Image (cartoon, coloured by chain):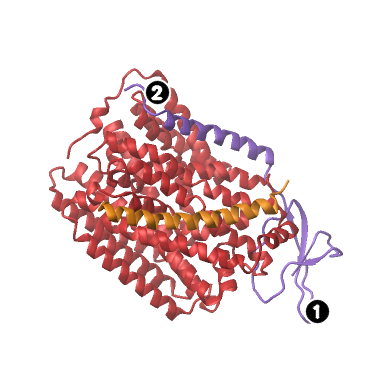
Chain colours: A purple, B red, C orange
Amino acid sequence: MLIATRSDFSDARTVYRGSAAGYFLSGLANGEYYFRLEGKSGAVSAPVRLEVMHQSLQRAIWLSAIGMLVTLAIVLTILRGARDE
Amino acid sequence: MSSADAILPANTAWLLLALFSVLWIALGVYWGRRNKSFEDHALAGRNIGLALGTATAAATWITSNTTMLAPQFALQLGIWGMIAYSTASFGLLLFAPMANRIRALMPKGYTSGDFFRLRYGKLAWAIFLVFTLFYSLTWLVSMAMAGGIVLNALSGIPYVWGMSVILAVCVIYTMRGGLAAVIGTDFIQSLIIIVGIVVVGFAVLSHVSVEEIHANLAAERPALLDVLFPAAIMAIFNNLLFGLGEVFHNNVWWSRAFAFREGVAGKAFALGGLVWLPIPIAAGFIALASGALNVPVPAPDMVGPLVIADVLGMAGAVAIFVIVFCSLASSIDSLLAATSDLVTEDIYRRMINPAAPQQNLKKIAQYVTVALGVFTWAVCLPRIGSLATVLFFAGPLVGAMIWPIVTGLYWRSATSVGAVGGMLLGAGVGLVCYFAIGWYVATLIATAVSMIWVLGCALIAKPRFDWAKLKETA
Amino acid sequence: MTFSSGFLNLIIYGALIWCAVSALGLAGCLLRDAARGDVW
């Protein structure tokens, strides 16, 4: 199985060689990718186009800030313990 | 997955399954002979020591998710995925001081339901019961289902048989032995799991170095190494809060707080958290090696077993089978025991038959365990894959219970209005966000909304709670 | 910005050794409890 970032596969490299019927791929950076399969005899499949777009980093950081605040508040409440007994 | 792809021959798998089944059931029956009353059965005589306490806290938190999902998380979310998963141990670490307080405030308590009833009254108690039963039953179903699926994928044992055997074994020894059997087997299971993970981890590293893994990732899957991988960063606090909510509310953990000997509870939960902390990384990094080892992964949830079987062959396949079986059993038994105690104490004893003597309660608890097993089995039978996703709905529910519980334990100013409103508002807004935005914000928003409501109510509250009301006798 | 190879080394070996130590610790703790008759 070949992966490339140009539709003419001029920069293709092999991601997997073998006989598995399925393949899970993760961790690609943002961008467009093209895949195709090549048989041992040289047969070539039609390319598959894939676009990778990660979640917005800004939103991730905002959510993390809220999460950190809530978590800190919980930790402080527990560590402070009971006061008005 | 067909049996042709299985990594372990079916007869070897059956033999392993039979050996462990006989062992757990024998231990359950043996330890069960100590139990005379409901208190012995449900809380193992309130006298669990530090070693068993630590091991049971860690083992119960090591579900099939930890050993199977940690590699999947690593493969999908990279290094942050493993670290984010490790933060689930904070649930145990933070529950440690709470467990001490629970034991001191409620020396005669049985369940987390007792706390809601005595602290916040009937309405909050009812909402709590709906939330916790929803969570516990979906967790139980998803684990029994995962058990059948994983055993099938590993060894080709048909799904229905694998699921039925695991569930039946856990039901039998939990019913016969009660919490003592659950905690005793947890100790053995936790040692098997940890030693197995260490051996497998070093064996994988003898085939591929960390440098090779890193070079392969940098070349082919750079986002997995990215310090600012957005999807992974978003997952961190959502997971952390889901974990806190699970531990803080569920009777699985409260029943242990009541069962540990005086002075042991806090230490055991803190040490259990520390024991658990490295496990998602130790079990998860194996997935990152799949590229460097050229192991094809057809679906992310099978990455761990595939890499291990590829590298270690038959021995690896046996190891992963045993690890997965132990992590499933250690959680299913705990959930069965804790949920049956909750139903027995909160529903049967407090709502239906308050005069029931201790001896009868033990019988009822045993029947409830069997009924829970049969119910779970019936739901798992058709193998509806989408059912497992229902567990994610539980995120907002458990998140919304964090603040009512924490403030209820520490602040006299925490009120019923605060608890009821916090649970309903938090869970409602969280569920809306689950559908409108995505799963990765649901728990976070639910906890935040419930926090604002609970704190607001506590701030303007006039009445002060009398802690002595929690010390209900019998 | 990416996690370095050294960091990956640290967390993987750290986690494995930590697990090994905690297994030994648990076993040792049980023996200690048993010696005192404090298991349960």
Name the amino acid type tagged 1.
Answer: Gly
Q: Residue at x 47, y 34 (%)?
A: A75
Label 2 vs label 1, nearer the camera: 2
Which corner quadrant holds the C terminus of chain A?
top left
Tell me residue B240's x, y (percent): 51, 43
**In the figure, residue B119 lies in which quadrant?**
top left
Residue B155 position (above or below residue A84):
below
- Name the residue that disc number 2 marks: B458
Task: Kindly tell me whether residue B335 is visible in this rendering.
Answer: no
The x, y position of residue B54, in whole percent, is 38, 50
In terms of image quadrants, where is residue B312?
A: bottom right
- Tell me the element at label 1: loop
The kind of residue on which mark 2 rests is Ala
B220 up-or-down from B132: above or below: below
Within 10 angstroms of label 1, few (less than 14), some, or many (20 or more) residues?
few
Gap in angstroms between the C-alphas marked 2 and 1: 73 Å
Of B442 and B44, nearer the camera is B44
Say left or right for B157 vs B52: right
Q: What residue is shown at x 40% (from left), y 23% (from top)?
A: B458
Among the 4 quarters of the image, the one containing residue A59: top right
Neighbour tally class for label 2: few under 14, some 14-19, many 20 plus, Cα within 10 Å = many
Q: Which residue is mark 1?
A: A42
Tell whether B80 sits left or right of B99.
right
Q: Residue at x 49, y 41 (%)?
A: B241
Q: Position of residue B191 (x, y in %)?
A: 41, 60
